[in-house]
Image: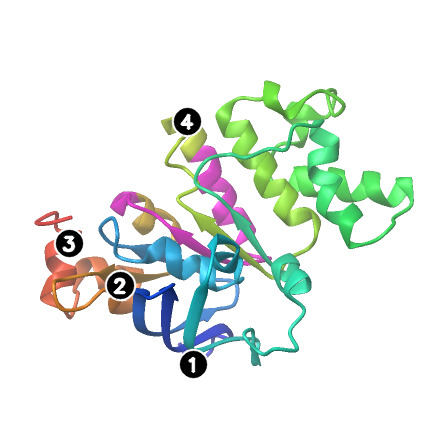
Amino acid sequence: MSNLTTAIQVKNLSFYYGSYKAIEGISLDIYKNQVTALIGPSGCGKSTFIKTINRISELEGKVKVEGRIEFFGQNIYDPKININRLRREIGMVFQKPNPFPMSIYENVAYGVKIAGKQPKVALDEMVESALKGAALWDEVKDKLNQSASGLSGGQQQRLCIARALAVKPKVLLMDEPCSALDPIATMKVEELIHKLRTEFTIVIVTHNMQQATRVSDFTAFFSTDESRIGQMVEFGETGQIFRNPLDTRTHDYVSGRFG
């Protein structure tokens, strides 16, 4: 790992919704241009953790954070941080496709327009580039002005990926991006992840063990028990986590004994 650049460094992170502690004492490095998978049973804090990385969790109510998350060396919880800029640099794709009720073009252009006025020619180029980046351009190039709601579920999810790519993020967070998709659409998204890793740092939450082995370079296993909530049990290269885990809880989970 010495030849890898750390994009995000998490240091002893605990996170609370009100008085409820959702995750406790998480420390790990997320490496640039690598795919990191977060696995573990429901309720173990995976989705909560991924939402702390771009502070979107704060939109869900009163929260408290202990510890640090550093994004290329900068503490994202520093009071001086520009949260809007942070969320452009750390984009997010959710479990269920959530296109806006507008045209395909306007969905992709939305974030770029909010960031600042752009000439129409530049906007057109950005939309085309983002749709190509999401492997969707050839399917929608002749219907950019049609409603995004007319796309299939898999196309809608790739549109949401294009929308995230349009603002040129450094990191892409994916919270179970394939859970609502059929196998063919899932395969297209996985192929896209392989392609995007050359340009972006990707963190993906998945319940699918096979998917984690197919798409990720590193895997973090989260778990919970009666005494501790939302803890990271083990982190390492994906091959090691699945073939030779160091913790018996990891072994039991990846071998299907629980979860």
Question: Which residue was labeled with disc 4?
Answer: 184
Say the numbered circle drawn on residue 253: 3
First in sequence, mark 2 or 3: give its number: 2
First in sequence, mark 2 or 4: give its number: 4
Q: Secondary structure at mark 3?
A: helix
In this rendering, which labeled residue sits more in front, label 2 or label 3?
2
Is 204 a magenta residue?
yes
Between marks 3 and 4, how big is the CA–CA gap?
Answer: 26 Å
Q: Position of residue 107 (x, y in %)?
A: 69, 35
User: Toward the viewer: 9 or 58?
Assistant: 58
Say what amino acid the circle numbered 1 marks: Ser
Say the numbered circle drawn on residue 84: none
First in sequence, mark 3 or 4: give its number: 4
Q: Position of residue 97 (x, y in %)?
A: 51, 34
Between marks 2 and 4, how big is the CA–CA gap?
Answer: 32 Å
Q: Secondary structure at mark 2?
A: loop
Between marks 2 and 1, how big is the CA–CA gap?
Answer: 28 Å
Question: Which residue was labeled with disc 1?
Answer: 2
In this rendering, which labeled residue sits more in front, label 2 or label 1?
2
Say what amino acid the circle numbered 3 marks: Tyr
User: Toward the viewer: 98 or 208?
Assistant: 98
Q: Is residue 188 above or below residue 35?
A: above
Between marks 4 and 1, how big is the CA–CA gap?
Answer: 37 Å
Q: Residue at x 65, y 28 (%)?
A: 101
Q: Residues within 10 Å of mark 4 (few under 14, many from 20)?
A: few
Question: Which residue was labeled with disc 2?
Answer: 230
Say what amino acid the circle numbered 4 marks: Ile
Numbered range of the magenta stretch = 187-210
